[in-house]
Image (cartoon, helix red, strand yellow):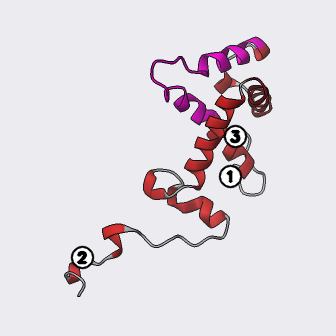
Amino acid sequence: MSTSRKTGHLTRRQFVAAGALGSAAIATGCAPGKQGNWEQIQAMSRKRFGQDLELLSQPQQLAIVSELSEQDRTFFELVRDHTMEGYYGSPRHGGNRDAVSWRMLGLPEPPPLGRSQYDLGKGSPS
């Protein structure tokens, strides 16, 4: 994927697209006993561009994602939702590393929940 010329980092759109593609691989294993759609996506990619999805250029990957959104809306929405949950969710749950999406939006980090909000070195609260 190409990077932004100003900062040398991925743009927000590029990050979300890359996350959606990566999440697609993970999401195929979400339903036990069912064959995932990752094979269906790889076949689409090979048929249209002659190579696996992860080897395509960004515009080619986006073309496959757009086609997927029309052909298998349910799977596309599952991948999109998981991507958004990971990017905008709480870092406590393994996504949104270092709260980057919250900082990007100008949101303060919420106070920690549970035991970590107390200084256990001072003894218990009165």
Q: Using the image as rendered, state which of residue 13 and residue 75 is in the foreground.
A: 75
Q: Amino acid at mark 2?
A: Leu
Horizontal placement of 25 versus 57: left or right?
A: left
Location of residue 18 (image quadrant): top right
Principal secondary structure, stretch drawn in magenta = helix
Pointer 1: what residue?
9
Pointer 3: what residue?
17
Give how far across and how far down residue 68 sits, in percent: 74, 26
Residue 11 visible to an observer of this rendering: no
Q: Residue at x 75, y 11 (%)?
A: 47
**Number of callouts:** 3
Please tell me how crowded label 1 is: few (under 14), some (14-19), or many (20+) other residues with Cα within 10 Å.
Answer: few
Give how far across and how far down residue 49 sits, in percent: 77, 17
In the rendered image of this protein, does residue 12 appear above or below residue 100?
above
Start and end of the magenta stretch?
Answer: 21-47
Horizontal placement of 109 versus 15: left or right?
A: left
Q: Residue at x 71, y 52 (%)?
A: 12
Q: Secondary structure at mark 1?
A: loop
Location of residue 105 (image quadrant): bottom right
Pointer 2: what residue?
120
Q: Earlier in the sequence, mark 2 or mark 1?
A: 1
Is 89 in the magenta?
no
Q: Which mark is residue 89?
A: none
Is 26 in the magenta?
yes
Q: Amino acid at mark 3?
A: Ala
Q: Earlier in the sequence, mark 3 or mark 2?
A: 3
